[in-house]
Image (cartoon, helix red, strand yellow):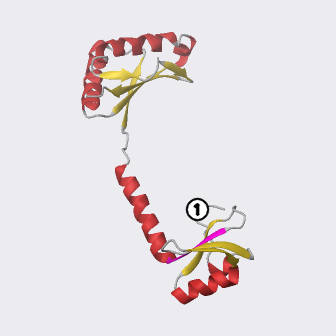
């Protein structure tokens, strides 16, 4: 049963349920029909909250209000989430020094803004035979930016790329 599938009122199949009121009142173990009558009398819904318990636990509550509050909580949690922005900088094994300097300058700016930077060295053709050249390139770049960030892992070879992730230093 997923979170979305909440059984209400007549959908509850158990003959006996442990019933709890919206205000915290405990009705004990009663028949489903009796619980439905109590809920109906109060103008509320009977909601199955613990289907695996013996007997299943139901709560008498306003389901519409309950769903609204759940959605509100989820939105609040989403607001507090921090989105990590990863900027990717592509390099090649035969890149000129001034091009490296230019790309490192951009990487430093990204790290200052609190973004993560992923360096990727693309290995072309015969360069695949010596992927260490890509690792050497990333080590060279790392020496230039190590004051501004932390390296997640050593440069890793993944297919045609050698990758290195740099995260900003904590203030």
Above or below, 130 against 16 in this view is above
The residue tagged 1 is: 3
Image location (x, y in percent) of residue 82 = 36, 44
Residue at the image point whose x is 59% and y is 85% from the top: 38
Nearer to me, 40 or 162: 40
> Image quadrant for the N terminus?
bottom right
Above or below, 118 against 54 in this view is above
**Quarter of the image holding residue 107?**
top left
Magenta stretch: dominant secondary structure: strand
Nearer to me, 131 or 115: 115
Image location (x, y in percent) of residue 119 = 40, 25
Residue at the image point whose x is 45% and y is 75% from the top: 65
Tell whether 45 sits left or right of 135. Answer: right
Tell whether 106 sits left or right of 56. Answer: left
> Image quadrant for the C terminus?
top left
Tell whether 44 sits left or right of 109. Answer: right
Above or below, 74 against 150 in this view is below
Tell whether 15 sits left or right of 119. Answer: right
Residue found at the far right of this picture: 15
Give yes or no for residue 59 being in the magenta stretch. yes
Q: Which residues are magenta?
A: 57-62
């Amino acid at each position: 049963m997923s979170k979305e599938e909440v059984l209400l009122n007549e959908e509850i199949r158990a003959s006996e349920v442990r019933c709890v009121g919206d205000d915290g009142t405990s009705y004990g173990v009663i028949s489903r029909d009796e619980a439905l009558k109590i809920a109906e009398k109060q103008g509320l819904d009977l909601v199955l909250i613990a289907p695996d318990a013996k007997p299943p636990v139901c709560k008498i509550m306003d389901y519409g209000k309950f769903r609204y509050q759940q959605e509100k909580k989820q939105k609040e949690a989403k607001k507090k989430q921090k989105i990590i922005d990863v900027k990717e900088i592509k390099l090649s094994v035969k890149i000129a020094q001034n091009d490296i300097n230019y790309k490192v300058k951009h990487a430093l700016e990204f790290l200052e803004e609190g973004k993560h930077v992923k360096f990727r060295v693309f290995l072309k053709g015969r360069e695949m035979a010596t992927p260490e050249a890509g690792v050497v390139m990333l080590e060279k770049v790392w020496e230039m930016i190590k004051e501004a960030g932390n390296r997640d892992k050593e440069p890793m070879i993944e297919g045609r790329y050698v990758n290195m992730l740099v995260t900003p230093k904590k203030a």
